[in-house]
Image: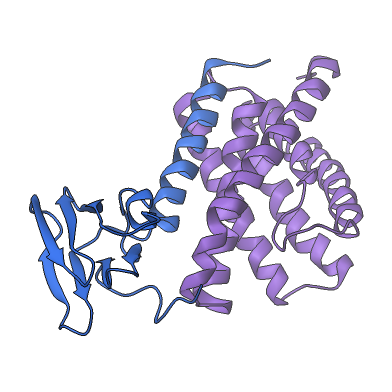
């Protein structure tokens, strides 16, 4: 978990590998139709959760930012409105993950992280959409519904991450 | 791999969604209760003050009670008692009426939610 003691080149290779995995999932998921705009399973966050819990916050942040930027370049939404929504969500999600990591890492498992991150992601992208793209007061009526989706889907990705973490071999130093 | 923090976060999430829904979906607190009889001018009563009073219409007396920001019709001389069965009106924008006795009761908040309602 100590980033300073990790060999830099080795850490870079890990970040690249995990980011590639997350980007792949991100692209596959973007092809899945969803009933509400802004709602998706967020399976790429499974990769981020695994990196966060095995290698710490800095590597998880690197994987997340790479996923959002490179993923959007592949899908073709880089610098389009969707990209900014995704980016705002990722930043909010990382901020909350960092907060949970700093305050309660010992008491929190992947499900807790996933729920907090999913709800933060939803809030971040919603606030940006509402403030910048559709500043209409009635849009606020959607927020509880969207957050409920985030809670459920966050728990779902958290459970997937937990079962993967259980199966992974112990980390080599 | 469920830890205590997971439950705390999930419960906090549920509480947040519940609080937001209550805030966003309720019409807000009523400021005044507006009672209208026939073609007379509507009379406004503060919603927070407890009072019970009657309004007379063509059929007789309609008794209205206001308490803690809510209002209801207690007694009405009409046939179907729809106004009584409407129960307590609780949110701004709620309204009921005794059409035979030409009495209507409406809760008004700081901004009206609807211009008019048709049934």
Provide residue A9's location: percent of width, then percent of height: 79, 40
Tell whether A20 sits left or right of A150: right
Residue A162 vertical placement versus A10 (above, below): above
Residue at left offset 13%, top offset 74%:
B43
In the depicted view, which residue is nearer to us: A95 or B92? B92
Viewer can see residue A7: no
Viewer can see residue B73: yes
Residue at left offset 50%, top offset 29%:
B11
Provide residue A104's location: percent of width, then percent of height: 48, 25
Q: What colouring does the structure picture have?
A: by chain
In the depicted view, which residue is nearer to us: B82 or A13? B82
Image colour for chain B is blue
Tell whether B16 sits left or right of A162: left
Provide residue A165's location: percent of width, then percent of height: 78, 22
In the depicted view, which residue is nearer to us: B81 or A56? B81
Choose top left, top right, bottom left or bottom right for residue B47.
bottom left
Number of labelled discs? 0
- Which chain appears purple? A
Choose top left, top right, bottom left or bottom right for residue B112.
bottom left
In the depicted view, which residue is nearer to us: A150 or A78? A150
Residue A58 vertical placement versus B81 (above, below): above
Tell whether A55 sits left or right of B78: right
Residue at left offset 54%, top offset 57%:
A143
């Amino acid at each position: 978990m100590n980033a300073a003691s990790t060999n830099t080149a080795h850490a870079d290779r890990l970040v690249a590998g995990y980011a590639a995995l997350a980007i792949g999932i991100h692209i596959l998921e973007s092809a899945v139709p969803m009933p509400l705009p802004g709602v998706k399973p967020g399976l790429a966050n499974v990769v981020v959760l695994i990196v966060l819990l095995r290698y710490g916050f800095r590597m998880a942040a690197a994987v997340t930012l790479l996923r959002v930027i490179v993923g959007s370049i592949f899908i073709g939404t880089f610098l389009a409105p969707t990209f900014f929504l995704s980016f705002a969500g990722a930043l909010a999600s990382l901020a909350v993950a960092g907060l949970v990591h700093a305050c309660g890492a010992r008491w929190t498992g992947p499900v807790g992280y996933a729920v907090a991150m999913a709800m933060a992601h939803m809030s971040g992208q919603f606030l940006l959409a509402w403030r910048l793209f559709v500043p209409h007061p009635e849009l606020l009526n959607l927020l509880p519904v969207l957050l409920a989706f985030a809670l459920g889907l966050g728990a779902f990705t958290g459970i997937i991450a937990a079962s993967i973490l259980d199966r992974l071999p112990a980390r080599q130093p | 791999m469920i830890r205590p923090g997971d439950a705390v976060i999930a419960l906090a999430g549920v509480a947040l969604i519940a609080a937001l829904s209550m805030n966003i979906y309720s019409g807000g607190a009523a400021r005044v209760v507006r009672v209208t009889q026939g073609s007379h001018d509507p009379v406004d009563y503060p919603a927070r003050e407890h009072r019970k009073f009657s309004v007379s219409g063509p059929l007789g007396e309609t008794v209205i009670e206001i308490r803690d920001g809510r209002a209801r019709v207690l007694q009405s001389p009409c046939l179907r008692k729809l106004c009584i069965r409407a129960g307590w009106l609780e949110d701004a924008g709620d309204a009921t009426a005794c059409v035979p006795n030409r009495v209507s009761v409406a809760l008004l908040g700081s901004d009206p939610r609807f211009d008019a309602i048709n049934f």
